[in-house]
Amino acid sequence: MRSARLDLALESGALTLPPAGAILVLRPRAGDDLSALPQDRVVVRTGFRPDHDHFAARGLAVDGQPPFAAALVCMPRARAAALAMIAEAVALVVPGAPVLLDGQKTDGIESLIKACRQAGLALGEVLSKAHGKAVVLTAGPVPGDWRAANRPVEGGFVTNPFCFSADGPDRGSALLAAALPAKLGPKVVDLGAGWGYLSREVLAREGVKRLDVVEAEAAALDCARINLDDPRARFHWTDALTFRPESLAETVVMNPPFHTGREADPGLGAAFIAAAKGMLAPDGALWLVANRHLPYDAALTAAFLDVETIGGDSAFRVIRAAKPRRTRP
């Protein structure tokens, strides 16, 4: 979808790339086709580790110093994050450089184009294709409140626009936190830790000596570092599905994601469950919260000998899964 609009922008002349200089591509998603751009000039910037690794594995640069000659901004669904990305791109390119904004209609690209017009930014022709829109913005000053900034939320935490549940603790995590026992094992992993709400709850439990805070989104992990002022916490910017602790843990806690982009993907949560199994000691336990409609039972019973629902409400269930099954050689 994105490649169709990028091709159209280049072929129509709506986007004219400067003859030299690096081209910033801001937060593309794994699978986005960037082949229409000169590959030796592309620099991908993203805080989401699986996407970062995807493009690095394909030989694209994932670091580079501004200013850039042009930019492609891959707009997300979250409005505050999208505005922050526009502000970031404009700050990283040379003044007057072309910045292509691209997004799906279902993710709110039309309202973002409107916001740019209302802010007095210079826009070219709006191109429509493949259920989305693209438009070239000429880099110039943007409203100051568009820039990403940490902000305080309930409980003395800070978050930013790129965090899940940026307005405060989500309901599922709160239910899981309330269900955790007073004492946990010495080694704990918070898998997909976000900005650190569950991690702080873990650190408040008796017996915890090491906590691996595992999060794929760099901006959320930066908030977790602020929110968790504790020497027992170790921070890992990595894909939860590939992380391995230095020694097996007694406990894994998680509120796993179940979306890839806009579409629900229960397989992602199932993959988190399988990954947690590989991190646990033989007598270890997984503490998990999930929406009740998600089909995780098969994944849980395939990975653990003992599975029980220990709490929740009408929308969520809190699950304890213990004794990971041994993998046959």
Image (cartoon, grey):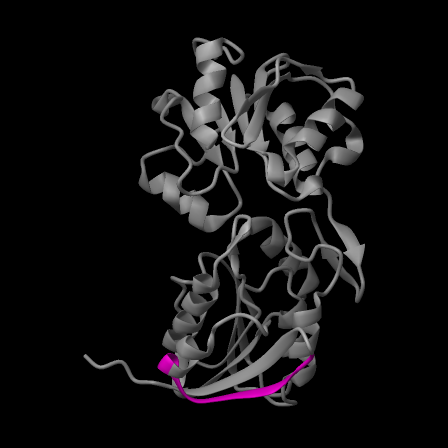
Residue 309 inside the magenta-drawn segment? yes
Relative to 144, 326 lies left or right = left
To which quarter of the image does residue 243 belong? Answer: bottom left
Q: Nearer the viewer, residue 225 or 284?
A: 284
Nearer to the camera, 131 or 117: 131
> Residue 12: where, in percent of width, then height?
48, 10
Q: Relative to 284, does residue 253 appear above or below in the rendering? A: above
| Residue 101 locus on image (x, y percent) | 59, 26
Residue 181 relative to residue 154: left or right: left
User: In this rendering, would 33 be left or right of 121?
Assistant: left
What range of the chain is rendered magenta?
302-313
Q: Which quarter shows the C terminus? A: bottom left
Q: Is residue 279 left or right of residue 286?
A: left
Q: Is residue 66 above or below residue 294?
A: above
Give the percent coordinates (x, y) of residue 117: 75, 20
Mark yes or no: residue 300 visible. yes
Percent position (x, y) of residue 42?
42, 26
SS majority, magenta: strand
